[in-house]
Amino acid sequence: MGQIIGQFCINVTDLERSIAFWQDVCGIPLRSRTQIPTALEAVLQADEGGSRIQLAQQLEKPGPIDMGTAMWKLYLNTDDCFALYERCLGAGCESVQAPARLDRWPVTVAFIKDFDGYLIELIEYHEGTPAGVPDPGSTNRK
């Protein structure tokens, strides 16, 4: 019996703004939308595969997202960390750390916070992605 992580679901305060960020800025296509009595939901996933991200706007809990201490960060693999970082800043995201090539690993990383305060690590692998990690540079983008 094999297992994979299918998707993560995060709460957002404005579903349309979050879809625009993940789809238009980060390039992750919208796959589906759902409305249930308590929430508006959207699922996004890259053509190359990888886990899906589900965005949920809770209809009965307005106000900012309580980040608590359970979640640290989301990772977003990219084939161009510098360009994606600039697109995120241009969309109004907060810079936490500008892109930097790390000495310890063959990667360039940057950190941003999205509109709801989620910390997102943008990561570009320079010597191929590790086994099992989808490579965003392996296929042509539409």
Image (cartoon, rainbow, N blue to C red):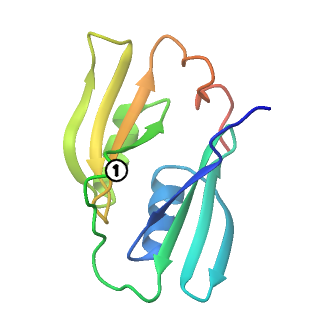
Residue 27 lies left or right of residue 93; in this view the side is right
Residue at 59 percent of width and 26 percent of height: 133
Which residue reaches farthest front?
Answer: 1
* In this view, 62 is above or below 81: below
Q: Quadrant of residue 60?
A: bottom left
Residue at 61 percent of width and 44 percent of height: 51
Q: Secondary structure at mark 1?
A: loop
Residue at 62 percent of width and 42 percent of height: 5
* In this view, 121 is above or below 26: above
Q: Percent from the top left, x then y, of residue 80?
A: 44, 31
Residue 117 lies left or right of residue 32; in this view the side is left
> Which image quarter is the N terminus in?
top right
Q: Percent from the top left, x then y, of residue 45?
A: 63, 50
Q: Quadrant of residue 61?
A: bottom left
* In this view, 9 is above or below 78: below
* In this view, 49 is above or below 80: below
> Which image quarter is the C terminus in?
top right
Q: Percent from the top left, x then y, of residue 16?
A: 49, 75
Give amino acid for label 1: Met
The residue identified by callout 1 is: 71
Residue 15 lies left or right of residue 116; in this view the side is right
Q: Percent from the top left, x then y, of residue 75?
A: 43, 39
Q: How many other residues sit within 10 Å of disc 1, few (<14), some (14-19) or many (≥20)?
A: few
Residue at 31 percent of width and 44 percent of height: 86
**Relative depth, front residue between 51 and 28:** 51
Residue 137 lies left or right of residue 69; in this view the side is right
**Relative depth, front residue between 117 and 8:** 8
